Image (cartoon, helix red, strand yellow):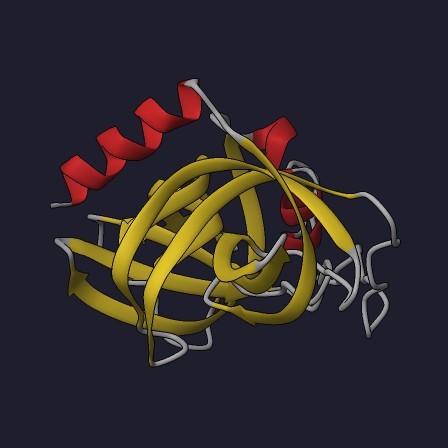
């Protein structure tokens, strides 16, 4: 099913249809922003990578693909139909400013490492490249979808994003330990079932320093 969905999104992305609609409601969850829009006489929901939008703004976006009966696990909500969209821009109103200021620096940073905030802020720059991040392990999960999952925070944040996820087949570090994590940056990773990551680091290794 996921392979079919991916093929559909890739195929429709090659022949993107551009929409323009008014924002009625917006919800952020699990790396997505879910937006109810009004386009002409029709209202419907769209989903795209997490961003700030303003109620009443007119936004433009490209169509990637429709899904019926889509369930968002993080919202615990099923949408009768939803449009996955990309390349959004605001036509008539500026985007809403973040409610908290960005914190780009970190006391954990060392030579050769970047902060969590720097990675989120520059995900296009780092996509497909290896990075090293030093921070504290805040959560671990073993063997989910045949991967181990490690969450790291370092006190930095960008637009409210302060938790960076690393996946690995290696042994996981201990909870609350301070480590250097190294791996390959992937952006806009969709595992399905509502698990979407604007940034995730895969094929990761860990060292204690």
Residue 158, picture quadrant? bottom right
Looking at the picture, how far across and down is residue 144, in whole percent?
Answer: 17, 62
Figure disc tally: 0
Q: Nearer the viewer, residue 106 or 68?
A: 68
Looking at the picture, how far across and down is residue 134, in whole percent?
Answer: 58, 54
Q: Nearer the viewer, residue 43 or 78?
A: 43
Quadrant position of the N terminus in the picture:
top left
Task: Say which residue appears at 88% left-offset and 54% top-offset.
Answer: 93
With 182 as the anchor, is 49 left or right in this view?
Answer: right
- Residue placed furthest toward the bottom: 76
Residue 207 visible in image:
no
Looking at the picture, how far across and down is residue 209, in whole percent?
Answer: 53, 55
- Residue placed furthest toward the top: 14
Residue 43, picture quadrant? bottom right
Looking at the picture, how far across and down is residue 79, in whole percent?
Answer: 35, 69
Residue 169 visible in image:
yes
Task: Say which residue appears at 62% left-offset and 69% top-offset.
Answer: 26
Residue 86, picture quadrant? top right
Q: Nearer the viewer, residue 27 or 134?
A: 27
With 175 as the anchor, is 19 left or right in this view?
Answer: right
Q: Nearer the viewer, residue 83 or 10?
A: 83
With 143 as the anchor, is 98 left or right in this view?
Answer: right
Task: Say which residue appears at 34% left-offset and 81% top-offset.
Answer: 76
């Amino acid at each position: 099913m996921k392979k079919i969905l991916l093929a559909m999104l890739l195929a429709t992305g090659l022949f993107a249809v551009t929409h323009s609609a008014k924002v009625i409601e917006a919800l952020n969850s699990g790396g997505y922003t879910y937006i109810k829009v009004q386009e002409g006489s029709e209202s419907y929901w769209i989903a795209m990578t997490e961003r700030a939008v303003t109620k009443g703004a007119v936004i433009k976006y490209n169509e990637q693909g429709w899904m019926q009966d889509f369930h968002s696990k993080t919202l615990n909500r099923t949408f009768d139909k939803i449009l996955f969209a990309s390349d959004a821009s605001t036509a008539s109103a500026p985007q809403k400013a973040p409610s908290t200021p960005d914190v780009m620096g970190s006391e954990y940073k060392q030579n050769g490492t970047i902060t969590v905030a720097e990675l989120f802020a520059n995900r296009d720059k780092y996509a497909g490249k290896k990075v090293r991040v030093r921070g504290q392990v805040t959560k671990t999960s073993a063997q989910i979808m045949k991967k181990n999952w490690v969450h790291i925070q370092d006190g930095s944040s960008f637009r409210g994003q302060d938790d960076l996820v690393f996946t690995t087949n290696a042994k996981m570090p201990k909870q609350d330990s301070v480590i250097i994590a190294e791996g390959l940056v992937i952006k806009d990773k969709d595992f399905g079932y509502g698990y979407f990551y604007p940034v995730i680091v895969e094929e990761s290794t860990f060292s204690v320093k």
